[in-house]
Amino acid sequence: MGVPFIDIKRFEPGFLEAWNAKVAEMSKNAQFIGGAEVATLEKRLSEYTGTALTVSCANGTDALQLALRAVGVGAGDNVLLPDSTFWATFEAVVNVGANPYTVDSNMTDLQMDFDAFAKAIDEVKPKAAMIVHLYGWGSSRLADYRALCKQKGVVLIEDGAQSFGVKYKGEPVYKGCQIATTSFYPAKVLGAAGDGGAVFVNDQALADKVRMLANHGRTTHYGHGAVGWNSRMDSLQAAFVNLGLDHFEARLKSRQDWAARYHKDLRALGVNDITPPADYVENGYCNVTLFENSKRTKLEAILKEKGIGFGNIYPGAMSDQPGAKEFLKKRFGGNNAQQVSSTVLNFPLFPYMTETEYKEILSIIENFLSGKN
């Protein structure tokens, strides 16, 4: 039968009809930039994330650059970031003119290694640091990261592109942040109909700076207090995300249920299936397993033959990317990020998967491990 790695076309009954009606209404009234949909979305996002203020923007990468610029990071400043992340985290630092230093992962929760990070702070004395909440959870040491950065006077920017809907110590993971970001890329847990992003803050002045930078540095329509760029979220994307929020709890539960099934069944098969740290309730963004490299290669070939989608999130460390060579100042820690990238395998996980699809995936894995295929 085959199963995609992710299917973003599985909408709730009535969703497409509501979306088509919304597009027709907004098109008729030329509601394309700003307006009620954007304002409503920002209010709802703040309520959901437990943050005081939300500024929407054009995409998740812009959200990172806006956050960096808003806290004053610029040319010549040093910034720490994980060696295991999506490229946008690294390039955001470079694009604001700062110096990136990467920090290795730990092998327990696959997040940034706290001890290596603490050493890097003392050596580099960065202006800011970026922590990434990977895989639909985050670091078991998140509270320590926040406390250490506060103690050292380092701004901590939290890249939450994969963590919308995650709970940390019973609260939304963004709630205790100084400044955090997310992405509404369509494959995210809460996705748009195109690109979109947001910055979450708990300080009015900081929110005003983010909003100004995202709108050409405007202070008035033709007054400019800073050099920004155009990173406004358009009204149609905001409307789509608003509709998604109406159904978000059902989507989230479906993802979480399938994530739990994977944890139970894969561990019973002896697979090194990574589970979130104790303080987290994951959002089911993706399933994460580690296989010895040659075994992973064989299993991937079988999955491909059977039409089963899979991922490698992520297949390379930042410090190994060709594009990083010119800019990377130093990396801290060992080679865990490289080890993860050479062994990580992600099986299909998306809302409203069917029992038939799941059993097909599990059967292929089970047969492979028992030597039947």
Image (tube, grey):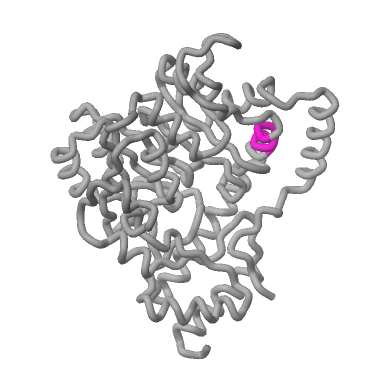
The magenta-colored residue range is: 237-243
Q: Which sits in the foreground, 154 or 227? A: 227
Q: Quadrant of residue 80?
A: top left
Q: Quadrant of residue 75?
A: top left
264 up-or-down from 100: above or below: below
6 up-or-down from 290: above or below: above
Residue 293: percent from left, percent from top: 37, 76
Numbered-mark total? 0
Residue 287: percent from left, percent from top: 48, 61
The secondary structure that dominates the magenta segment is helix
Residue 230 visible somewhere in the drawing: yes
Viewport quadrant of the N terminus: bottom right
Q: Is residue 276 left or right of residue 55?
A: left
Q: Which residue is outermost to the bottom?
A: 372
Residue 199: percent from left, percent from top: 48, 30
Residue 54 visible somewhere in the drawing: no
209 up-or-down from 292: above or below: above
Q: Quadrant of residue 147?
A: top left
Q: Is residue 241 magenta?
A: yes
54 up-or-down from 246: above or below: above
Q: Residue at x 66, y 22 (%)?
A: 34
Residue 334: percent from left, percent from top: 21, 59
Q: Is residue 200 left or right of residue 177?
A: right
Q: Residue at x 53, y 26 (%)?
A: 229
Q: Is residue 251 magenta?
A: no
Q: Residue at x 54, y 9 (%)?
A: 223
Q: Which residue is outermost to the front?
A: 326
Q: Residue at x 59, y 57 (%)?
A: 350
Q: Which sits in the foreground, 232 or 206? A: 232
